[in-house]
Amino acid sequence: MLVAGISETLRAEVKKYQDIVERLRLIALNKQQIQAQLGEINNALRELDKAGEGAAVYKVVGTVMISKKRDDVIRELNDLRETLEVRLKALEKQEDLLKKQLSQLEKKLARKLGGSAPGAG
């Protein structure tokens, strides 16, 4: 009975470990997508800067391109960049927290399994 209890506890901790690893994978994917969007926004802003004040500017909305004021597009892109940067920082904080939890769980599992934690020494 004692072995079954330990086994269930260990199984739950392994499951938690796998869940954290999966969450970290999803965060990495989200970060990559946000970084790509930020790159596109920065490229667009550079091109708008090169285009100058009087340049015709168009924005894709759904399946249509509409004419927009250059300054409005710049403002929209800057707002979006700011939002994405906040989201990226939040993901980085979440990632750091999960990495700490993962490290603690690795040490705990290593002790329970009678080994030593990876990287310990």
Image: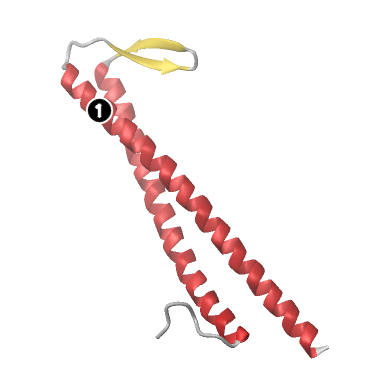
Image quarter in which the N terminus is found: bottom right
Residue 48 in picture, x, y percent from top left: 23, 22
Residue at point 49% right, 81% down? 117
Residue 22 x %, y %: 57, 57
Q: Say if residue 30 shows up in the picture.
A: yes
115 sits to left or right of 88: right
Residue 3 horizontal/vertical position (percent) = 77, 87
Residue 69 appears left or right of 6: left
- How crowded pointer 1 is (Cα within 10 Å; few <14, some 14-19, many 20+) is rated as some
SS at badge 1? helix
Please, is residue 37 above or below residue 53 in the view?
A: below
Task: Spot the residue most to the right.
Answer: 1
Circle 1 is placed at which residue position? 45
* Closer to the camera in the image, 25 or 100: 25
Amino acid type shown at disc 1 = Leu
| Residue 23 on image: x %, y % | 55, 57
Q: Which colour scheme is used?
A: secondary structure
Q: Which one is nearer the viewer's eye here, 27 or 106? A: 106
Quarter of the picture containing the C terminus is bottom left
Which residue is found at the position 50% from the left and 57% from the top? 24
Q: Nearer the viewer, residue 50 or 29?
A: 29
Number of marks: 1
Residue at image point 18% right, 17% down: 51
Residue 83 in view here: no
Q: Going by the image, does 16 lie left or right of 32?
A: right
In the rendered image, the vertical position of residue 48 relative to residue 99, given as above or below:
above
In the rendered image, the vertical position of residue 71 relative to residue 100, given as above or below: above
For residue 65, side relative to residue 73 (left or right): right
The residue at 39%/10% (across/down) is 66
